Image: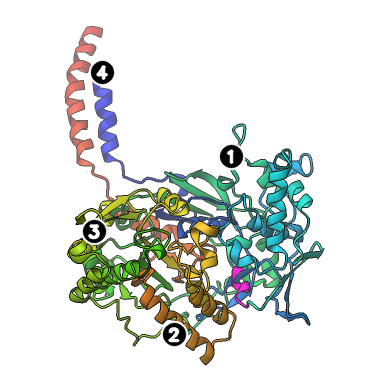
Amino acid sequence: MKRIAAALALAFAAACGNDPYPASDAASRVLYVPYAEAPKTLDPQVAYSVYDHEVIANLYETALEYHYLKRPFELIPALVEAVPEPQPRADGRIAYRFALRRGVRFAADPCFGLGTPGATQREVVAADWAFALQRIADPKVGSPVGATFAKIVGFSAFAERLAQLREREPGFAALRIDAQYARAGPVEGIATPDPWTLEIVLGEPYPQILYWFAMPFTSPVAWEAVAAYDGEAGRPRFAERAVGTGPYRIAEYAKRRRIALERNPTWWGVEHAGAGAPAAVYPIEGEPGDAEAGLLPDGVAGGPLPFLDRIEMRYEKELIPSFTKFAQGWYDRSKIPKESFDQAARGGTLSPEMQARGMRLDRTVMPGVYYVGFNMGDPVVGHAAGERGRKLRQAMSLAIDAPEFLRVFLNGRGIPAQSPVPPGLFGYDEHYRNPYRQVDLARARRLLAEAGYADGVDPATGRALRLTFDTGDPSVQARLRYEFLVAAWRRLGIDVEVAATSYNQFQEKVRRGAYQVFFWGWIADYPDPENFHFLLWSEMSQTRSGGPNSANFSDPRFDALFLDTRARANDAARLAGIRRMRALLEEERPWIEMFHPEDYSLSHAWLRLAKPSGMTMPVHKYWTVDPAARAAARAAWNQPVRWPAYALGALVVALLVPGVVTYLRERQ
């Protein structure tokens, strides 16, 4: 009988559907999306990768945000009442005064008991913004953007005082973090004249500073959260325990499996939406074509945010299984794997099969660049090798065929890059051709010989020059891409070995400077060419300051041009400076520019109001789903297989009937 019961259970299991989500979710506005790389950190002052920000943007907020629909991008006030104007001072300094919104509270968390016993929540005040900026300056925090904020008067001096106190006073580091900052003294250029006003003073003009106040680095942070979540005695680390002001809060954080976000019931926008706070309501206007695309429907424009009840993120290391689940309706949005591209998008338009299912193709050129980089701190490929290293880099650049790379691996989804600046930004020139980004193997071999590596042979060993190519993507697909690059260099006689690790391990290698050649990408933080040129500014060197200059490029000529152009208006003088920087990078070759990515994403018809941005910005609060339409489509696309249940049921009846007959006879 036990075997029969087991057979029945198996039969009914076979008859069930393959829904991976609880039935209670069916009627809820839940967004289901996959993610391929786990966040490194949820610390807003440290996080800098796209993977980090995809989560953080829902949990922490900033003073300013970008208008969700308008292009070119336009800053709007979020946690402040208005976008501040620069206030020049007689001494050449520039002040910005932020009027903070009242009634903004941190998400409920027991950490607030540190400040007020029994408290689980409190309002955000100007001191929290000052604390966040001090954390950027704190060497122990390791924020990658300290050099940018060093423009604030007294910022670097605060960092030095803090470091000296920690070094000289043995007990200082044991003090609570807010006490440490208080002992180090205030930052001269950061003032909080009252709880609702933050003022920063820059030593020189830098109009891009406002863009940084639309990035998580400047999100207000509670000292209680940093102090409470120190990773000691079984407590979580602050890097994995977000306590922000965003429209969502963490419900579950198992980053190698699932990240679940739920509505923050005390989000400030619920109260401020009625007053028309721009970041708390859906836009009432956009750019031409938005209304026709269904992005400004009646009853939604001007309505309170957020629309989604929950965001379910599931870890999917490989894109093909993830895309299969999307096709079944289990994910609401998906990238398109190379293997399925021709079936999904033919000639840049959605295939008839996908159209029949009501799917939508979103296509946009990203404001970003992917490149092969050289560690300029390496003795073989870097600055120390002088002219020899320069010609080696030039030769390796001439060997790489970016258009072919795009065709083979990305279905042509991208624009071959000639310089760091992407399309859509001031300084981009679609007619410019970099002389070292056109394939020329004969010239490459001549340069290699001039560098002392004739036919790729290292005279020190008498064998092929050996280099290491580091990557943070160990997947099979990535391995094939990198072997394409390696094969090009092997045609020159250079032996390049691929060292593939996880993304986080790769980041650690970059931080330590333990690499030679690497593949990297950058998506704009803000829409200005300075955001790409600063990737090669020596002050942003990874090994020097922990900044995003992963090539560790350092050239006084480039630095001078960068500093001269960064704060200028978009005029002829700035354009001339950008072109001089471009010419210098042509020759020095710290990068082999590969491509500006073009994003193709598929969405199901039930995902509404989703507009691709290409920028790292909070978007999920603007999205919504139609649960009924989704449930109907899933039911139609995932019919349960019922014949095993019927067959096994008949078998069970056949097995049971003789036993029942025998039992009845014995009873008689």
Q: Residue at x 66, y 61 (%)?
A: 270
Q: Earlier in the sequence, mark 1 or mark 2?
A: 1
Predominant secondary structure in magenta?
A: helix
Secondary structure of the residue carrying numbered label 1: loop
Q: Earlier in the sequence, mark 1 or mark 4?
A: 4
Kindly report the distance in space between the C-alpha atoms of the residues bearing marks 3 and 2: 35 Å
Q: Which residue is mark 3?
A: 458
Q: Which residue is mark 1?
A: 236
- Label 4 neighbour load within 10 Å: few <14, some 14-19, many 20+: few
Numbered label attached to residue 579: 2
- Classify the position of the N terminus by image quarter: top left
Residue 470 appears left or right of 32: left
In this rendering, the answer to whether 163 lies above or below 481 is: above
If you read the primary sequence from the N terminus, does the residue marked by circle 3 or circle 2 appear first? 3
Between the residue at mark 4 and the residue at mark 2, the CA separation in whole angstroms equals 83 Å
For the residues bearing labels 1 and 2, Cβ distance under 8 angstroms: no
- Amino acid type of disc 4? Met
First in residue order: circle 4 vs circle 2: 4
Instruction: Give the SS element for disc 4.
Output: loop
Q: Secondary structure at mark 2?
A: helix
- The amino acid marked with disc number 2 is Arg
What residue is disc 4 on? 1
